Amino acid sequence: MRIIGLIGGVSWHSTLDYYRIINEEVNRRLGGIHSAKILLYSLDLGEIKELQNQGRREDVEKILVDAAKKLERGGADFGLICANTLHMYFDAISRSVSIPFIHIADATAEKIREVGLKRVGLLGTLPTMELGFYRDRLAEHGIEVIVPSREDRVEVDRIIFEELVVGKFLETSKKRLVDIIDRLVEMGAEGVILGCTELPLILRNAEVDIPLFDTTRIHALKAVELSLG
């Protein structure tokens, strides 16, 4: 079994899901009382968010690169960033260490292609929806991405940072998110990527007519696949 390195804490609520899903799947595959071999480096989301708000992305990059190096020194065989937005620093992290990191968009694209979809909606933080780092990665896999209107993007971002990352899961917000998904369908989306690891926490049981791609679960299961070989 290869050792999985996790950069987590962004937020800790979704990191809990990573830890749970990975261990449940390892136990399902190996049986008995087996569990996963994991190294977790948990970041302070408040510090990361403040630096992002100040436009100090170089400082955020240094924090993430330092975390990746510590996982490598600790013995991790490969790593995951337990957040979609922070994949904007994926290339810098990959260059800084010799162990591979699994890109969350690559794993998600693999699942989208498995079900034969080519055009999907994307929900996430404003950077994930508006910057090219995520959409361009999906485009490399032949997947077209649709994002919500500016008004809807701002609302999704608000729900994530004002509610989900602090453990608030409101039915009213769930309804707003489902309405936004419905509008993405009207725009031609065949499925929707839950491109923030907090979104599955509120939308896991949402009643919608198209596939929802839970990036947390997809990413975690890809880690198990690589760990067990």
Image (cartoon, rainbow, N blue to C red):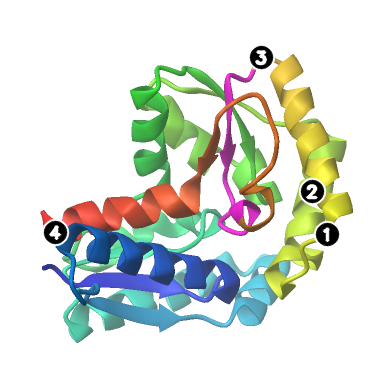
Question: Badge 4 is on which residue?
Answer: 228
The answer for how far apart the CA atoms under marks 4 and 3 are is: 38 Å
Is label 4 in a helix, a strand or a loop? helix
Question: Badge 1 is on which residue?
Answer: 170
In the rendered structure, the answer to whether residue 16 lies left or right of residue 3 reads right
Question: Which residue corresponds to the image point at 24% horizontal and 74% vertical from the top-left?
Answer: 35
Q: N-terminal of the two: label 3 or label 2? A: 2
Q: Give the range drawn in magenta.
A: 189-200
To which quarter of the image does residue 107 belong? top left
Question: Badge 2 is on which residue?
Answer: 174
Query: Given the image, on which type of amino acid does mark 3 rest?
Result: Gly
Q: How crowded is mark 3: few (under 14 residues within 10 Å), some or many (20 or more)?
A: few
The answer for how far apart the CA atoms under marks 1 and 3 are is: 28 Å
Query: Given the image, on which type of amino acid does mark 2 rest?
Result: Lys
Q: Can residue 29 be seen in this view?
A: yes
What percent of the width, then of the height, locates residue 160? 73, 59
Q: N-terminal of the two: label 4 or label 3? A: 3
Circles 2 and 1: CB distance less than 8 Å? yes
Q: Magenta stretch: residue 131 in it?
A: no
The answer for how far apart the CA atoms under marks 2 and 4 are is: 36 Å
52 is higher (above) or lower (below) than 67: above
Query: Given the image, on which type of amino acid does mark 4 rest?
Result: Leu
The quadrant of the picture occupied by the N terminus is bottom left
In the rendered structure, the answer to whether residue 228 lies left or right of residue 188 reads left
Q: Residues within 10 Å of mark 2 (few under 14, many from 20)?
A: some
